[in-house]
Amino acid sequence: MNPERLAKLQKAQKDVRIGGKGTARRKKKTVHRTATTDDKKLQSTLKKLGVNNIPGVEEVNLIKADSSVIHFTNPKVQAAIGANIFSISGQAETKTLPEMLPGILNQLGPDSLSDLKKLAETYGG
């Protein structure tokens, strides 16, 4: 066997070896998925469900049970209203309820208003 071919085979063998010398070679090199492939899969699944884009949404606030708020600024909102499916994607920030006041007063429901009263009592002393 010629030395060039031997060197080429040894280099190829080093690329696929997962352990030290004497271990078995992998059959194929695994390709790791990126976030973009996951996003494409999600978008194709949402398309199958028949979601439509909802334009003009400037912000979305999700208020959790512990009175923290997940705040999206300029999100991409998609919905399939018949199937009761809503998709919100974009950059999210987790904030506390007092940080968001008074801008979200009109978005608060009855549960959150009772939490707000408790919060006012603690600050009012």
Image (cartoon, rainbow, N blue to C red):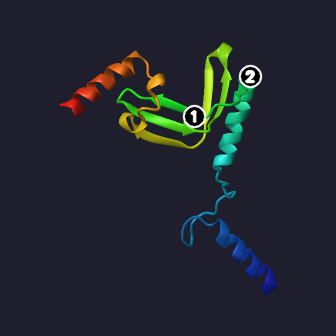
Marker disc for residue 32: none
| Residue at 61%, 34% in the rendered image | 58
Marker disc for residue 59: 1
Other residues around mark 1 within 10 Å, as few (<14) / some (14–19) / many (≥20): few
The residue that label 2 is drawn on is 50
Task: Name the N-terminal-most of marks 1 and 2.
Answer: 2
User: To which quarter of the image does residue 124 belong?
Assistant: top left
* Three-letter code, disc 1: Glu
Q: Position of residue 117 (x, y in %)?
A: 29, 23
Q: Position of residue 8 (x, y in %)?
A: 76, 78
Q: Position of residue 11 (x, y in %)?
A: 70, 76
Q: Nearer the viewer, residue 71 or 80?
A: 71
Question: How many numbered marks have been drawn onto this rendered protein structure?
Answer: 2
Q: Position of residue 76 (x, y in %)?
A: 65, 35
**Secondary element at image label 1:** strand
Considering the image in quadrants, where does the C terminus appear? top left
User: To which quarter of the image does residue 122 belong?
Assistant: top left
* Three-letter code, disc 2: Gly
**Secondary element at image label 2:** loop
Comparing labels 1 and 2, the label whose residue is closer to the camera: 1
| Residue at 48%, 42% in the rendered image | 93
In the visual, does 87 lie left or right of 7?
A: left
| Residue at 71%, 30% in the rendered image | 55
